Amino acid sequence: MSREGVTPQSEDFSAWYNELVIQAELVDRGPVRGTMVIRPYGYRMWELLQADLDGRIKEAGHGNACFPMFIPESYFKREAEHVEGFSPELAVVTVAGGKELEEPLVVRPTSETVIGEYMAKWIESHRDLPLLLNQWANVVRWELRPRMFLRTTEFLWQEGHTAHADEEDAMRETMWALGAYAGLARELAAIPVIEGEKTPSERFAGAERTYTIEGMMRDGRALQSGTSHYLGTNFAKVFDITYQDEDGKLVHAHTTSWGMSTRMLGGVIMTHGDDKGLVLPPRIAPYQVVIVPIGRDEAAERTAAAARDLAGELKRAGVRVHVDDRSQLRPGYKFNEWELRGVPVRLEIGPRDLDGGAVTLARRLGDQGKEQIPLDRAAELMPGILDDFQAFLYTRAERFRDEHTADVESWDAFPDQVSQGWARVFHCGRTDCEDAIKADTAATPRVIPSDAPEEHGVCFRCGEPSAYGKRILYARSY
């Protein structure tokens, strides 16, 4: 263990992560295996992500709704591919109120089936389209290998569900959602995600096409951080979601669904964190600045008062700030604690600082070390300092991703590349070839990148012609 209390990433990345989420007070383990309690510090991060995404969703014309978490089992059985895809993960209620239920109830793993039932009820004419719904909810998927934020039995997310007159409009919606997730990841979480389409074997159960954003974590693995699905008319046919077109003809609607979850918080932790603990992008940090007054007796009273005054100025400048004036703790302990918890900027105010009209600034990362800035200009300067740190984290993560991504032409070179990062490869597109690659290396096709150039070649494993007209990304994943 390091002096900060977390295993170094280089020794055991998984242990580092599992220890950090607990010690940084993001979560605690729930009473049921695989569940988590999100503590206030972690939940504030979720609220900041949620508020931004909710604003994007509403601005695009969607309305928030709330559907039941208990779904009749028969709803799932009506869409065979969907129920097959989710069967191992379902939690089912068979007894309630002391009596066995006539029909088992599935605890919501996702809401296509129940929302499809109500779309059919609410849509009659082409004038009712598009129907744009969103739900912020908790869902349950019975995970065999749970990990906080990444895969838990119960987690928080949003799920968009929309119905459209035709494929063109539905695909426009599908790509809008993908762009919203990519924007959130890049602009708030400072994660340089790759966006694109999933291969057929990786599609959401019941979807015609699935799109994803994929981020690289600091152990070289990929994290699927948000997905958007064009469902075609698959669910519309099952749930009879039809409308009368302008000619009076009854036509099936085209539907979409898309979701982002608390998994994004796991992505933030693993994209930016280091051996000292969390490293939080300012835009989702619960505290962007922590002020630590330093001094004893009368000096302590003087520096604490100055810290409170400065905090007021920073709040008026729109900065989330906290004053750590716990007198029973030494400054060094506080510095280590706030480094562990990833605060972007720490300000120290000691008697000498006050005498010089300055405050000492320390960033969570960077090679600049400590510096002094004028106390009377700290509130004016801080928004720019935080923006620079946000940009620094994005550039750092982008550089790491690019340094750990390489073109791979042969099967012999592939295992070593996916042990440390991502491989750009030509692939035949055959499911049996994908399965064999996964069995041998634990790597899977993560994404067919939207912005990859057109290229043709032969599959790096079997030698058959490539199927996608470009290289795709393979990686081990969470």
Image: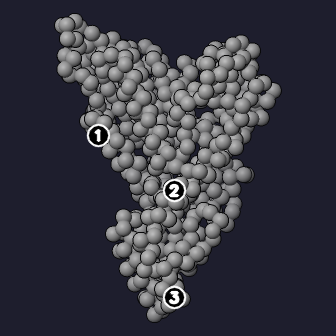
* Three-letter amino acid code at the position of disc 2: Gln
Q: CA distance from mark 3 to mark 2?
A: 29 Å
Name the image quarter holding residue 121: top left
Q: In the rendered structure, are the residues bearing label 1 and label 3 in contact, judged by CB atoms less than 8 Å apart?
A: no
Q: Is residue 433 left or right of residue 118?
A: right
| Disc nearer the start of the sequence (1/2) | 1
- Position above or below: 420 against 123: below
Measuring from the top left, give residue 93's x and y in whole percent: 37, 29
Residue 38 visible to an observer of this rendering: no
Q: Which residue is disc 1 drawn over?
A: 58
Question: Residue visible at 28% across and 34% down?
Answer: 62
- Quadrant for the C terminus, please: top right
How crowded pointer 1 is (Cα within 10 Å; few <14, some 14-19, many 20+) is rated as: some
Residue 79 sits in which quadrant? top left
| Residue at the bottom extreme, as displayed | 298
| Residue type beneath disc 1 | Lys
Sequence order check, earlier mark of 1 and 3: 1
- Between 88 and 267, the residue placed more toward the observer is 267
Mark 2 sits on what residue? 390
Q: How many marks?
A: 3
Instruction: Identify the image quadrant of the N terminus.
Output: bottom right
Badge 3 amino acid: Gly
Depth order, front residue of 295/311: 311
* Residue visible at 18% across and 7% down in the picture: 248
| Residue with the mark numbered 3 | 356
Mark 1 residue element: helix
The CA distance from mark 1 to mark 2 is 26 Å
Taking the spot 37% from the left edge, 27% from the top edge, the residue there is: 173
